[in-house]
Image (tube, helix red, strand yellow):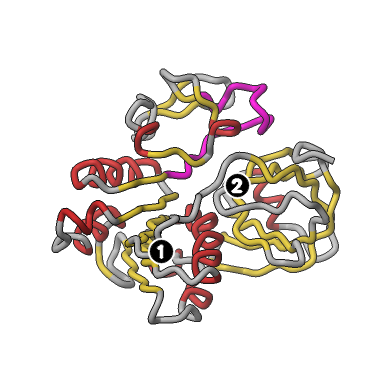
């Protein structure tokens, strides 16, 4: 059995995260355990198949996907009840690699549903004894994800910062600006010893890349693109001008790669393959 073999699995648990967002948990018996940043293709029989970041996986191979209701397929996922079936292919793509240097200043910067793979990464960092900081941005307080889980982490090893567009929780403003505030007193040596992992709106990640380049900070972004296949056949997730595929070469890309991708922060493709602006 390969990662592209579809398995039909029962939904074992459902958690309501916030308005319009649910986490579905299912047990996937496989030797191919996912890692933070990887995704799965989720098939709803009779509806569609869509890519979803894996937001958790425990030792018993219980996987989780966090679903925002934005269309026909995600609406169908929200309508599922316990013991309903979904089809799952994965894990697919590359993943966030933990720093070899445990003294690194580690930042996880996310926005909206982009917190899903960062939740998985935070769990692995916490389990492995790393110190890290999370910055989560959202439109308003009711959109913030995983708050109960994050506050259960060891407060000596983890630090949490929140911002909202309307100022209803945490700082008023954007995650990229809050990151700039938190590093404003860093020395050149501290910049060199910092790594940023990010997922969320691409405009946010583009701004983060610019800030990290300015300060010589190591940076990784998890990109989201429309996919039909998840295995490099449809070409809808192609990144110009390098021709990289988010499904095969990503979804995690380093700053060195992102600097060469002209589409990053500017364009994505629709279901016809036509480029559309992200602005």
* 75 horizontally vs 137: left or right: right
Secondary structure predominantly adopted by residues drawn in magenta = loop
Counting from the top left corner in percent of width and height, residue 120 is at 56, 60
Q: Circle 2 sits in a helix, a strand or a loop, which is it?
A: loop
149 or 138, which lies in front? 149
Q: Label 2 belongs to which residue?
A: 38
Give the residue drawn at x 69%, y 45%: 91
The residue located at (36%, 53%) in the rendering is 196
In-front residue for pair 262/193: 193
In the drawing, what numbered circle is on residue 60? none
Can you give x and y, in whole percent of width and height, for residue 23 in the image?
Answer: 64, 62
As drawn, the label of residue 102 is 1
Image position of 231 with respect to 200: above or below? above
Image quadrant containing the C terminus? top left
Task: Judge by depth and name the residue closer to the eye, 72 or 195.
Answer: 195
Look at the image and say whether residue 202 sits in the magenta stretch: no
Identity of the residue drawn at 67% across and 60% down: 64
Q: Residue at x 55, y 71 (%)?
A: 127
Residue 226 among magenta residues: yes
Coordinates of residue 143 in the picture (x, y in percent): 45, 64
Would residue 256 be found to the left or right of residue 199 on screen?
left
Residue sitting farthest toward the front: 101
Q: CA distance from mark 2 to mark 1?
A: 22 Å
Segment colored magenta: 221-238
Above or below residue 249? Residue 139 is below
The reply to whether the C-beta atoms of the residues labelled 2 and 1 are less than 8 Å apart is no
Question: Alpha-carbon neighbours of circle 2 within 10 Å: few (<14), some, or many (≥20)?
Answer: many
Sooner in the amino-acid sequence: mark 2 or mark 1: 2
* Quarter of the figure with the N terminus: top right
Numbered disc in front, either 2 or 1: 1
Residue 100 x/y as whole percent: 44, 55
Disc 1, SS: loop
């Amino acid at each position: 059995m390969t990662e592209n073999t579809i398995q039909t699995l029962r939904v074992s648990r459902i958690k309501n995260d916030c308005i319009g967002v649910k986490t579905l948990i299912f047990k996937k018996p496989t030797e191919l355990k996912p890692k933070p940043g990887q995704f799965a293709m989720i098939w709803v029989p009779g509806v569609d198949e869509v890519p979803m970041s894996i937001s958790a996986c425990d030792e018993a191979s219980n996987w989780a996907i966090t679903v925002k209701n934005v269309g026909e397929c995600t609406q169908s996922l929200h309508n599922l009840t316990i013991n309903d079936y979904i089809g799952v292919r994965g894990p697919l793509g590359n993943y966030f690699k933990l720093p070899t240097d445990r003294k690194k200043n580690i930042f996880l910067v996310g926005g909206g549903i982009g917190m899903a793979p960062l939740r998985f990464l935070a769990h692995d960092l916490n389990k492995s004894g790393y110190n890290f900081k999370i910055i989560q941005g959202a439109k308003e307080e009711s959109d913030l994800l995983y708050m109960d889980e994050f506050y259960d982490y060891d407060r000596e090893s983890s630090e949490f910062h929140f911002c909202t567009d309307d100022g209803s929780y945490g700082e008023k403003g954007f995650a990229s600006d809050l990151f700039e505030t938190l590093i404003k007193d860093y020395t050149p040596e501290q910049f060199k010893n910092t790594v940023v992992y990010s997922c969320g709106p691409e405009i946010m990640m583009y701004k983060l890349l610019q800030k990290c380049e300015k300060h010589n900070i190591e940076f990784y972004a998890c990109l989201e693109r429309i996919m039909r296949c998840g295995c490099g056949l449809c070409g809808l997730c192609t990144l110009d001008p390098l021709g990289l595929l988010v499904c095969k070469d990503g979804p995690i890309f380093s700053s060195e790669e992102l600097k060469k991708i002209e589409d990053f922060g500017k364009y994505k493709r629709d279901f016809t393959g036509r480029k559309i602006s992200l602005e």
